[in-house]
Image (tube, rainbow, N blue to C red):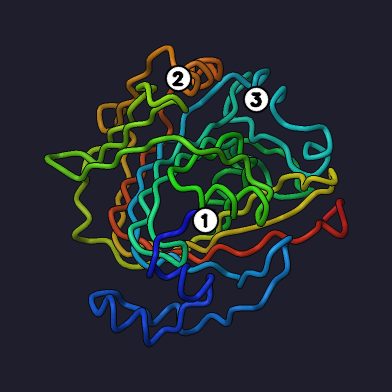
Amino acid sequence: MPVLKGGLFDRFHSNSPMDIVAKERPDIDLSWFKTIQKQKKEVGFTTYSPNFYYSNSSITAIYTADMAKIKELIPEKVKGLVQPISYTPGKGLIAITSYAYHYCDNDFYNELSISIVTTKPGKSNWGLISLMGELNDKNLWGYVLKLPVNTELARVRGVYGYNLPKWLIPIDYTNEGNNLTFNYYDEKGNFDFSMAGKKLDVSTSTPEITRSNFINLNKQGQLTHGYTDVRAMKKASSKSAEDIQLNLSDGPLSTFIKSLGLSKLVKYDYQPEFQAALYTPELVKDENK
């Protein structure tokens, strides 16, 4: 597996010493990471959980989408534990997020996440009430549909360590002008689509931590639960469709996005600076809780 020679992963394999990180990146606030204890894990290879993401940027768009299509995409076993949140009759919610991981235990890479917003395990589907409850608790749940990345290290670790639907494609990230822009290509290098998010005013934002949970199946067909704790350093949100643009083509990801029947923008999140701790998934022991 190709890795960046001399990078954090090459030297420390997901267990980077804080003093080394502080020396290499004195501009990063490491206080939160120092409160988290890593644990050694065997997931087909040796790793350490959680994986630390020290400096990152992202844009997220949450849209209403065709509920019938959404239900087709969730495995029956997963639907026995979580349900797609019903936003309005016939409409569920799809979250599309573009990530730029500038400096992390896996060095640096870009990623696209397309996921279904779901209820908490075993909880009734009360639509907007369920959604607002998760937002207020800063404890979100979802089922990941697509998660392409642009490094082989991120792909291998995601597929084998986290049971995630990752594959390798070229992804460009630019931070110029008034937008954060991500360009996605197919596996042959042909342009697929772009996602451009407006840079909102983050001057009044304060750090806050939100947990994003994901339920999926491992290679044995067993339910697993993983999560990421995200510390937003700078963040702002909007409900204006003019602030986020998806420029689609006839490429494979574009075709998939079109098939979801996206309609109304519910929320746009601009997060130019955040930190994260990604925990290795564990088997769901009690599927009713």
Residue beneath the point at 23% across and 42% down: 174
Instruction: Give the answer, above or below, for where 209 lies relative to 267.
Output: below
Would residue 260 be found to the left or right of residue 197 on screen?
Answer: right
Residue situated in front as seen by the camera: 195 or 232: 195
Residue situated in front as seen by the camera: 11 or 226: 11
Residue on which disc 3 sits: 70
Q: Position of residue 53 (x, y in %)?
A: 43, 64
Given the image, on which type of amino acid does mark 1 rest? Asn
Q: Position of residue 160 (x, y in %)?
A: 67, 52
- Looking at the image, tell me whether mark 3 or mark 1 is earlier in sequence order: 3
Q: CA distance from mark 2 to mark 1?
A: 32 Å
Residue on which disc 1 sits: 136
Q: CA distance from mark 2 to mark 3?
A: 16 Å
Would residue 215 be found to the left or right of residue 146 on screen?
Answer: right
Determine whether the residue tagged by mark 3 lies in a helix, strand or loop: helix
Name the outermost residue toward the top.
250
Crowd around label 3: few <14 · some 14–19 · many ≥20 (10 Å): many
Determine whether the residue tagged by mark 2 lies in a helix, strand or loop: helix
Q: Quadrant of the C terminus?
A: bottom right
Crowd around label 1: few <14 · some 14–19 · many ≥20 (10 Å): few
- Looking at the image, tell me whether mark 2 or mark 3 is earlier in sequence order: 3
Given the image, on which type of amino acid does mark 3 rest? Ile
Q: Position of residue 124 (x, y in %)?
A: 75, 42
Residue on which disc 2 sits: 254
